[in-house]
Each structure stands twice: as structure tokens, then as C-alpha cells.
Image: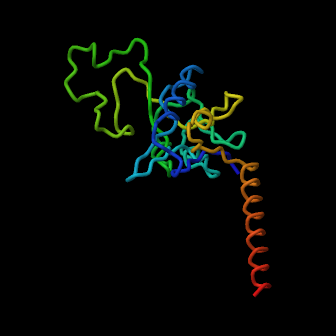
């Protein structure tokens, strides 16, 4: 089973601390600073949504340059290899791969090009990131990497003030299953004891 981070909506307060922490730690590492997770609001509930590191990884299957691979029980993206085709973002069943980019040296942008017309080549605020483009910007896929460069694990999990984010791996699942088995055994013992008294 691949590792992944999941949120408990009942604990999430929608403060966006996880997004800010994600941006800061990746920028410090020299990677794209765009957050690898997005806090989604639905009615009164909020929760961050991020890569589930699928075992069949549709994003890896469609990548034409093998920039996305399975490694160390995770789906890993190599930003240097990525060509920005956005196929992974389209294939992702959770919609958690976002194209982001940085300016390419020597390429004119719409800010310094005299013949640029409004709306042409600009990143429009209301446009879906998959469709948006900007002159002079190299688009690169951005997805959760579980902060594999960080010995302390995912920064979003560490920085959440309400402990709403959890790293799920084989060890965490075994602990959860063990706790459920003990709770079930205790409930069964109480039920049997109650029946024997009556």
C-alpha cells in the first residue's frame, strides 16, 4: 500500500496553515512554491484535499516523459523532467494535480510586450488552471510529494494546529485496526456479560 495524507473534516477549522506551511517548506527546498494541497469548503465543513498516491497511479500512466513514477510507497513527481503537458492533471481522479510555473529567462511576458492584446496569453483569474497559460511561463505539474526531502515527514501534518491531518501508512493502518479489534472485543465482552446477568 502506498503512503498518503488524509484529513479529518471534523477537526479541520479551515485556517489554511497547512497550505502556507507546504508553500514555505517547498520554496525553501528550491521547488515550486505552489501548495500541494487545497482546503476545500463544503457547507460548514472544511478539509484539505491532496494526492492519495494511488497504487495504480493514472497520472504516472499518462505521463509521456515518465516524470511521475512509483517510488518508496509513494507516487513521485520529478519537476525537472516534467514538460507541463497537463495530462496528469486531467487523469487524476481526485483533481489534486495543479499546473504551476515559473518565468523562463529570455522570454517576453505579457507585461513587457507592446503588441500583447488583453486576454490573449494571460492567466485569467476565472480560468481553470488546466486551461490557463501565460507567455514566458513554463508550466510544471505540482502534487503532494509527502515532503520526502524532510526527515520529519509531511509539513502539513506537523503544522496543523488541530491535528486534522494524518499520514496513512502500513504502520498507521495496523495501529488503527488493532484499536478497532480491542474496542470490538471490549464491546462484545460487555454485551456477553450483560446477557448472562439477564
- Residue 129: image x %, image y %? 38, 37
Q: Residue farthest to the front? A: 197
Q: In this view, does 148 lie above or below 63?
A: above
Q: Nearer the viewer, residue 73 or 15?
A: 15
Q: Which of 19 and 94 is in front in this view?
A: 19
- Residue 3: image x %, image y %? 67, 45
Q: How is the image coloured?
A: rainbow
Q: Which residue is drawn at 49% across and 47% down?
A: 47
The answer to whether residue 45 is seen in the rendering is: yes
Q: Residue at x 61, y 46 (%)?
A: 53
In which quadrant will I find the C terminus?
Answer: bottom right
- Residue 114: image x %, image y %? 21, 14
The answer to whether residue 142 is seen in the rendering is: no
Q: Is residue 132 above or below residue 138?
A: below
Q: In this view, does 61 lie above or below 139?
A: below
- Residue 40: image x %, image y %? 43, 45
Q: How many labels does the image show?
A: 0
Q: Residue farthest to the bottom? A: 198
Q: Nearer the viewer, residue 1 or 155?
A: 155
Amino acid at each position: 500500500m502506498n503512503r498518503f495524507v488524509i484529513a479529518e473534516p471534523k477537526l479541520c477549522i479551515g485556517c489554511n496553515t497547512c497550505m502556507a506551511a507546504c508553500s514555505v517548506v517547498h520554496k525553501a527546498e528550491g521547488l515550486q512554491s505552489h501548495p500541494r494541497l487545497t482546503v476545500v469548503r463544503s457547507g460548514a465543513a472544511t478539509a484539505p484535499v491532496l494526492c492519495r498516491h494511488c497504487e495504480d497511479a493514472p497520472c504516472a500512466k499518462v505521463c509521456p516523459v515518465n516524470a511521475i513514477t512509483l517510488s518508496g510507497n509513494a507516487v513521485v513527481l520529478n519537476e525537472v523532467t516534467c514538460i507541463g503537458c497537463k495530462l496528469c492533471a486531467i487523469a487524476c481522479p481526485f483533481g489534486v494535480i495543479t499546473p504551476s510555473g515559473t518565468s523562463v529567462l529570455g522570454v517576453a511576458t505579457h507585461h513587457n510586450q507592446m503588441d500583447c492584446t488583453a486576454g490573449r496569453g494571460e492567466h485569467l483569474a476565472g480560468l481553470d488552471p488546466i486551461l490557463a497559460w501565460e507567455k514566458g511561463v513554463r508550466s510544471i505539474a505540482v502534487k503532494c510529494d509527502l515532503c520526502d526531502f524532510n526527515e520529519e515527514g509531511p509539513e502539513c501534518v506537523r503544522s496543523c494546529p488541530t491535528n486534522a491531518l494524518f499520514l496513512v501508512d502500513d504502520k498507521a493502518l495496523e495501529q488503527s485496526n488493532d484499536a478497532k479489534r480491542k474496542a470490538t472485543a471490549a464491546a462484545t465482552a460487555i454485551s456477553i456479560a450483560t446477557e448472562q446477568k439477564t
